[in-house]
Image (cartoon, rainbow, N blue to C red):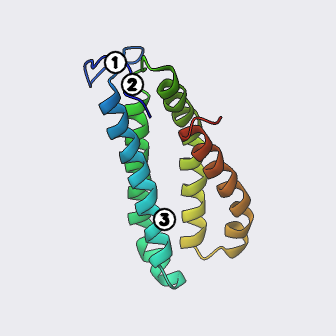
Amino acid sequence: LTDGGDPDDTDAAPGQTGDVQQYRTDREAASQALTSYSEILQNASSPAELESSADEAQAQLDEFDEAIAMLDGYMLDDAELEEQRAGIVETAPEVSDTLRRFTDAAAAGDLEAVTELIPEVTTALTNFQQAAAGNP
């Protein structure tokens, strides 16, 4: 990634120019929330543990949504980074929605729903990763 654009107000309103450092901070916050979410699910070794950690997993998705809202509040002067930022913002709602439904189904012990959601989860995460890499 390159450091293009001039630093601007980091609390830029929609349509305003944000700075590259703010973008990196917001992108990292979204990434960290997804990583934490994944770790919560991986550490649950039983349906009971998954059910007890569902609120914590949903809280990580709340943090993901907050980071995405920040990313949606500005645009970047750097064309490559702006393409990434816009792609992340565009694909994130599908990720959040799908992972929330997946977590709810897993916590409820609904194995059929979990299984049915796996392709949707995979597609949503693949689309998000491609957008974050600048390959929409």
Q: Which mark is residue 73?
A: 2
**69 or 34, which is in the foreground?**
34
**17 lies left or right of 135:** left
Q: Quadrant of the N terminus?
A: top left
Is the C-beta separation of discs 2 and 1 under 8 Å? yes
- The residue where tag 3 is placed is 38
Is the C-beta separation of discs 1 and 3 under 8 Å? no
Task: Determine the secondary structure under disc 2.
Answer: loop
Task: Give neighbour class at mark 3: few <14, some 14-19, many 20+ (Cα, 10 Å).
Answer: some
Where is residue 94? Give x, y as percent: 60, 44
What amino acid does circle 3 point to?
Answer: Ser
Q: Residue at x 54, y 82 (%)?
A: 47
Q: Residue at x 60, y 62 (%)?
A: 102
Task: Give neighbour class at mark 2: few <14, some 14-19, many 20+ (Cα, 10 Å).
Answer: some
Q: Residue at x 61, y 51 (%)?
A: 125
Task: Determine the secondary structure under disc 1.
Answer: loop
In terms of sequence position, does the residue under pointer 2 or pointer 1 come before the other?
Answer: 1
- The residue where tag 1 is placed is 13
Q: Quadrant of the C terminus?
A: top right
**107 or 122, which is in the foreground?**
122
Q: Which mark is residue 63?
A: none
Where is residue 14? Give x, y as percent: 40, 18
**47 or 21, which is in the foreground?**
21
* Separation of marks 2 and 1 at Cα, in angstroms: 5 Å
Up the image or down, 76 lies above or below 127; here it is above
* Separation of marks 1 and 3 at Cα, in angstroms: 31 Å
**121 lies left or right of 34:** right
Asked which quadrant contains residue 119, the reply is bottom right
What amino acid does circle 2 point to?
Answer: Gly
Tag count: 3
